[in-house]
Image: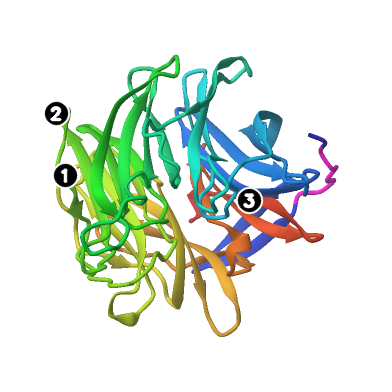
Amino acid sequence: MKVLTILLSFLMIVSCASKDIVIEEIPFLYENSNAQPSLVSKNGSLSLSWISSNGEKNAALNFSQFKEGKWINPQTIATGSDWFVNWADFPAHAINGDLILSSYLKKSTSGTYTYDVVLSLQKLSGEKIKEDFILHTDDVKAEHGFVSIIPNNNNGFFITWLDGRNTVDQGLDGHHKPMTIRFAEITSVGDVTNESELDSATCDCCQTSIAVTNNGPVVVYRDRSNKEVRDIYIARKINGVWETPASVHNDGWIINGCPVNGPKVAYNSNNLAVSWFTVSNQKPTVNLSFSKSNGASFGSPIKINDNDAIGRVDVAFLNDQEVLVSYIEVDDVGTYLRIKKVSIDGNVSAPITISQIDGGRNTGVPQLEIFNDEVFVVWTVSVNEKNQLKSIKLSSKNI
């Protein structure tokens, strides 16, 4: 992968209340088209994966770490000409020690939405442990995707995904059965273990999110009821057993289709934070709710947006008592990517505008992480008619 030289970083100063906040662009411009970022801060590292393509239906999954103020030594994890590449269903990755587990989507037949979740396990040095193995065991030609991965305490990984193995069958009403959400563990040698179904009916194409609390893993996703209520639910594994999923909040949003707008979850010191998009009462809203009980119950939702929300949220803890939420909203002037600081006691800061953006699919799902007292945001922009990643950082101490 050849890097196009950039001589200067871009600095922008924005005002938030009485503070001036400096937003610094981190140079990132490679040949070919680049999109579908996944940004991860965990265990003392900040890493980024993304998909590049050359316009000839050839795709590559790439990986880089942030060190010494820049993205360094990009590695190509996998390549293919038969992948399913989509702005909303993007690859995931996680690091555990010197291991990195990555996912991408590979077509299983010629159908538009028939594809498998394929995994690659390697060392950070690039040494391959297990390449191109399918996550799920059903061998059904259906949709599988919207993956989330997080390291566990056994040198392996927890992984969750939306699984369409049941959608090829029809129910008694003549309609196809709904998408499900499943969970598994990946060992340090790439074995898939403890696969289980968490919910038999979920929204078809909203991103999932996963965290690990003191009690075990939790998975947050958009549920789907028989009456097409599509609210945010949480599944928790307690003492080795998955509890019946429960709603984070009863929004009562009825929609006869997928909004392609999943939730995000973050955890820190017994506190869990979930952010999500909803249109309950016909008002597009980004909400945030805290749990002080590892997800057993949640406080009342805190509204984040000031204007009409588009959503595509992310959330990260600044400290034990505060989080940052990123979101997209639109006003009479344009569409903006913004962040806000929210405390557990309900205080919400003024918004910080990261950038005016394209509100369509080309922007993708912006990624937010906090690393070494700095806030990082990555999203997709169009440069010379090609998709490119834009990454910025700002000091968390000034927010």
**Residue positioned 64% across, 40% down in the render:** 82
The local secondary structure at tag 3 comes to strand
Span highlighted in magenta in the image:
3-9
**Residue positioned 50% across, 52% down in the render:** 113
Nearest the viewer among 276 and 132 is: 132
Classify 394 as above or below 279.
Answer: above
Q: Is residue 219 magenta?
A: no
* Marks 1 and 3 close (CB-CB < 8 Å): no
User: What residue type is disc 2 on?
Assistant: Asn
Upstream in sequence: badge 2 or badge 1 = 2
Q: Residues within 10 Å of mark 1 (few under 14, many from 20)?
A: some
Q: Label 3, on which residue?
A: 392
- Colour approach in the figure: rainbow
Indicate the position of residue 232 as horizontal and vertical percent values.
28, 58
Q: Label 1, on which residue?
A: 293
Indicate which label's residue lies in the foreground, 2 or 1.
2
Choose top left, top right, bottom left or bottom right for residue 244.
top left
